Image: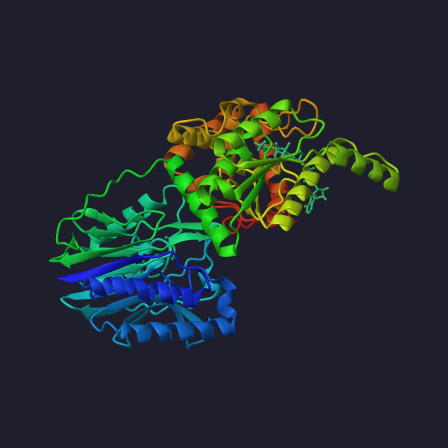
Amino acid sequence: MLRITVAQLNLTVGDIEGNVQRMVAAAEQAAAVQSELVVFSELALCGYYPGDLLEEPAFLQRMEAGLAALLQASEQWPALHWVVGTPTPAHGPGKRLHNSLLVLQGGQVRLHYAKQLLPTYNIFDERRHFEPGPDVAQVLRIGSAQVGFLICEDGWNDHGADYATNPFQTLADAAPDLVVSINASPSHLGKRGQRQQIFADAARRHSLPIVYVNQIGGHDQLVYDGASFAVEPANGVVFEAQRFTEDICTLQFKHGQFLTAQGQPPTPVSAQDISSHDFYHRQMVLGLRDYARRCGFTQAVVGSSGGIDSALTLALAVEALGASNVVAVTMPSEFSSSGSVDDSVQLCRNLGIALHTHPIADLVTCYAQQFATSFGTPLRGLALENVQARIRGTVLMEYSNTFGHLLLTTGNKSEISVGYCTLYGDTNGGLGLIGDLYKTEVFALAQYLNAQAGRELIPQAIIDKAPSAELAPQQKDADSLPPYPVLDEVLKLLIEGERLAAAEYASAHAVVQQLQQHDAGRALVQRVRQMVARNEYKRRQAPPIVRVRARAFGSGRQMPIAAHTV
Ligand SMILES: Nc1ncnc2c1ncn2[C@@H]1O[C@H](COP(=O)(O)OP(=O)(O)OC[C@H]2O[C@@H]([n+]3cccc(C(=O)O)c3)[C@H](O)[C@@H]2O)[C@@H](O)[C@H]1O
Ligand SMILES: Nc1ncnc2c1ncn2[C@@H]1O[C@H](COP(=O)(O)OP(=O)(O)OP(=O)(O)O)[C@@H](O)[C@H]1O
Ligand SMILES: NC(=O)CC[C@H](N)C(=O)O
């Protein structure tokens, strides 16, 4: 029998001293329940993903010191083996580091495994810093079991399609009793099911039980949901750690099966995932909470237009940071409807947050007059419209400068896709909270939050009103954009394509096929394509957005700007 403690922690990139402390505390818990193995996530020591910090000598020195501290701590509990993810030096030609897994015990390194498959696609860029490890299995006897080790992507090629080697097969050939996989697997819609499927299939194919340990937490645009798990070849996933929160839990491994620490069969794991709304909600709340915490913010400010985007952003911010830490600012202009203020008042009352009023009509007039005087031509049309958004953006940044609040940008994925936003105006901000949600999803999530709360958090009037930038008289989004239910389907296919889940792909594909049947539809698709391509420059200058879908803007979609792409 082997006791294994899964240490699913929220570690901070670069905070090596803090990470060591958390790992030692988890090891202490593991030792207290007589575990022989405590398993941390991929690159736990430095946090995933450190990026070009890996090129800084001082950072590498701090990591060496961190590893020495872990080795020293491991002497306290000699029966405990620590599975630690850390960069290690690579000595051949090529990159100077490996992405490694070390097993520490009694002050010694007992095993060293270097990750073979380095993901370099979508949001991953590991080949930039790491040299792949050799195609060699690493197995260690721990107590009664022969334990083999893999690191994240190493387990994703068991179908053999993407890389020349299959580390899972190499490991299976060495015939361990158990596989331990350490991971840093960011979450997006559908990711939990994908991971569990891949590892359950591999377990079945090779008749190997697997313990899969992931990290949790928000790191810039990526969020990790944890959901570490154990799979048995015959029974699939038999254990799952909590999602979106730290979890330190101990399993027994006995005769090829996993049991609870008390020797009972674990609680059955549902194959059914949480709803997409629940997923989005939890992912964005954790994403904002960790971003703010790690960057030293406790408070956030949002411009409240009385529209759905700012309303949803405010509601999520309240959950992440607490009502007393979120401030809304309404900034009516000449074109603002009375609803923009009244609905903001009601929203902020529902959420229990402070609302400040900062009218901008006089500022716009003053700005326009000075512009005409200086440049001999009046500000009109789009330029005049955009001044309103820019004045609002400036007011919000001044608020942030003065009071130290993080400014949250409210753009959604539909608008960001087609550039329906004003550069240096409503794109101002430090973090885009709902920037990976299509507009139709924004409405649905608002309704979900109300249903969850059992009351109107977001006033129904805000959900019901037609989206409008309110930058010109009677302006509606629908005047310049296709209706969102159509636009969103076209965008899904264009931006996410094959990465869409089967049902979403089928629906988007059907809408686009229908549009392709007639001239107006074809023109619409082409126009959307052009808008997306032409507005890359705005996205490149926009703040990071919290990723919730398989393909998000930012590092997940790296397009040229000064190029002819359509
Ligand atoms: N390739 C490129 N590389 C770098 N910069 C480039 C560029 N192309 C244009 N630019 C610059 O960008 C400027 C145009 O961009 P920008 O100033 O943003 O202005 P623009 O995109 O022309 O207008 C903003 C649009 O967003 C809509 N809007 C605004 C605010 C809120 C909402 C909403 O409902 O949420 C909608 C508004 O109705 C309008 O259709 C150009 O004047 C130029 O300076
Ligand atoms: N009158 C206003 N007062 C305060 N902030 C505003 C106002 N109008 C716009 N903003 C800010 O600019 C963002 C873009 O707003 P706009 O109303 O132009 O478009 P939107 O994308 O439909 O957003 P929303 O659904 O929040 O209205 C808003 O989310 C809000 O943060
Ligand atoms: N860190 C990794 O190797 C992650 C890659 C992996 N395919 C995942 O997203 O889970």
Q: Looking at the image, which residue is at 53% across and 38% down?
A: 413
Image coordinates for residue 197, horizontal then vertical, percent: 28, 46
Q: How many marks?
A: 0
Image coordinates for residue 4, horizontal then vertical, percent: 21, 60
How is the structure coloured here?
Answer: rainbow
One can see residue 102 in this view: yes
Q: Name the quadrant containing residue 270.
A: top left
Image coordinates for residue 345, horizontal then vertical, percent: 57, 29
Q: Looking at the image, which residue is at 40% across and 42% down?
A: 282
| Figure quadrant, ligand 1 | top right
425 lies left or right of 543: right
One can see residue 149 in this view: no
Q: Name the quadrant containing residue 207.
A: bottom left
Q: From the viewer's side, name the closer residue of 114 and 38.
A: 38
Image coordinates for residue 187, horizontal then vertical, percent: 39, 47
5 lies left or right of 466: left
Q: From the viewer's side, name the closer residue of 492 and 145.
A: 145
Q: Is residue 561 above or below residue 344?
A: below
Q: In which quarter of the image is the C terminus?
A: top right
Q: From the viewer's side, name the closer residue of 407 and 2.
A: 407
Q: Is residue 345 above or below residue 224?
A: above
Residue farthest to the left, as pictured: 255
Q: In which quarter of the image is the N terminus?
A: bottom left
Q: Looking at the image, which residue is at 28% across and 65% down?
A: 27
Q: In this view, does 267 lie above or below 137?
A: above
Q: From the viewer's side, name the closer residue of 456 and 121.
A: 456
Q: Name the quadrant containing residue 471.
A: top right
Q: Looking at the image, which residue is at 32% across and 74% down?
A: 71
